[in-house]
Amino acid sequence: MKNFFKYTSIALLSSGIFFGFVSTTSAQVKSNLNQHSSTDIIVGAENTKAYLKLLKNKKVGLISNQTGIVKEGNKTIHTLDLLLQNNINVVKLFSPEHGFRGNADAGAKVKSGVDDKTGLPIISLYGDNKKPKTNQIADLDILVFDMQDVGARFYTYISTLHYVLEAAAENNKQVIVLDRPNPNAHYVDGPVMKNEFKSFVGMHNVPIVYGMTIGEYANMINGEGWLEKGIKANLEVIPLLNYSHQSKYDLPVKPSPNLPNAHAINLYPSTCLFEGTNVNEGRGTDLQFQVYGSPYLKSMPYQYTPISKAGATSPKFKDEVCFGEDLSKVAYQNGINLEWLIKAYKNNTKQPFWTKNGSKLWIDQLAGTDELRKQIEQGWTEKQIKETWKNDLDNFKYIRAKYLIYN
């Protein structure tokens, strides 16, 4: 995928240095924005004229991770740096799944701690403390949310967003969401979540791919009364500039350890469904979510062996030869592909194919329904399955339209 908007200091990011402090004034930030061409996407965090004035003389909590970065000349810095350089009083940090630095395994317990670059306390919003507690935000005036979403319902940053909005509403705190592009905003697809299958990987009655930026999604959570008891947060979304849902956008840094590139992100809404099966989804390789395989798909020609790697220390079928399919060269996807999951189900030689998350089938929680699993078991084709999604998708698109900022 050709970069529509490209940061120029990937080497800085890949080295893990996100928080170098350089003296920068608001005037310099404005000058940096002027360096963008008229077609460059300007992320919400870079749209400083719209929000820095709202943070002056306020005690701020920042909810972010390694994706909260902005362009500064020919390099990138973290949004935290930008705020501190502009004399914003950031009191504490909050981190989602994978931690503030974004290097923890999926599902791994992330502890609270202290940011070694700034000395600011970090409160983990994953594990047992998914929702900010009253005493954790009592000393704050405003919560600023700046994280990169990838547009799939089971990607948990939108669940963290939900709980931040809810805690803020319950404690009369303002929330400012600094919007970022959704690399999968160009389509809407998948089964819509059913209430009985809600969990942290699916909290709202939306399809797997909802085609909205995280700012638009925040407005929908708030506007539709999805917070506890229908309460409403004092929410402001700082918009992107030069952006539409059809804008192709390659992220300047991995949003999480196992989404290494634009192709993996594009395939993720389809290949993440393998998480609910006895098939490896590429964790433990350099082609995460771009290959799939297992020891029980021996009729399939592609082979690879998952190993322990950073971000996937215990991948499914670690050190075992897996047979499957290489998707690293398939075309750009404009919808969820079910053919790969159906093919794996048909070629699998060991039961159970579907795996459990506790007492529940993981595939049902990921899909948001048990219908997809049952349809595959009954031999339905992708076309037949997708036909059953149509009415729910049409209803969702009607709701979605009320909250779109970028048309």
Image (tube, rainbow, N blue to C red):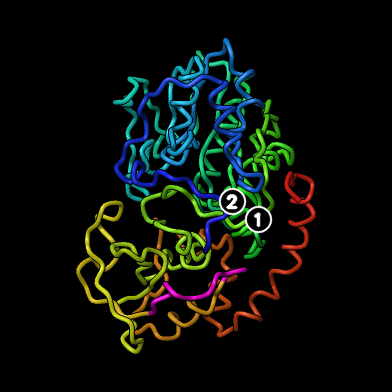
Is 100 above or below relative to 247?
above
Main SS class of the magenta portion in the image: loop
Other-residue count near label 2 (Cα within 10 Å), few / some / many at <14 / 14–19 / ≥20: many
Q: Secondary structure at mark 1?
A: loop
Task: Magenta stretch: give its range.
Answer: 325-336
x, y percentage for residue 362?
A: 45, 61
- Helix, strand or loop status at disc 2: loop
Q: Is residue 58 visible?
A: yes
Total label count? Answer: 2
Of the residues shown, which amino acid type is indicated by label 1? Gly
Q: Verify whether residue 45 appears in magenta.
A: no
Q: Are marks 2 and 1 in contact (CB under 8 Å)?
A: yes
Residue at horizontal 42%, vertical 70%? 354
The residue positioned farthest toward the left in the image shown: 319
Q: Check disc 2 and give the amino acid type.
A: Asn
> Looking at this rendering, what residue extends furthest in the top direction?
57
In percent of width and height, residue 105 lies at 32, 49
- Using the image, tell me which numbered label, if any, was put on residue 182: 2
Percent coordinates x, y for residue 296 in the rendering: 31, 81
Between 47 and 256, which is closer to the camera in this rendering?
A: 47
Separation of residues labelled 2 and 1 (CA atoms) = 8 Å
| Label 1: how many Cα within 10 Å (few below 14, some 14–19, many 20+) | many
**Residue on which the image places disc 1:** 211
Q: Is residue 327 magenta?
A: yes
- Quadrant for residue 127, please give it: top left
Classify residue 336 as left or right of residue 356: right
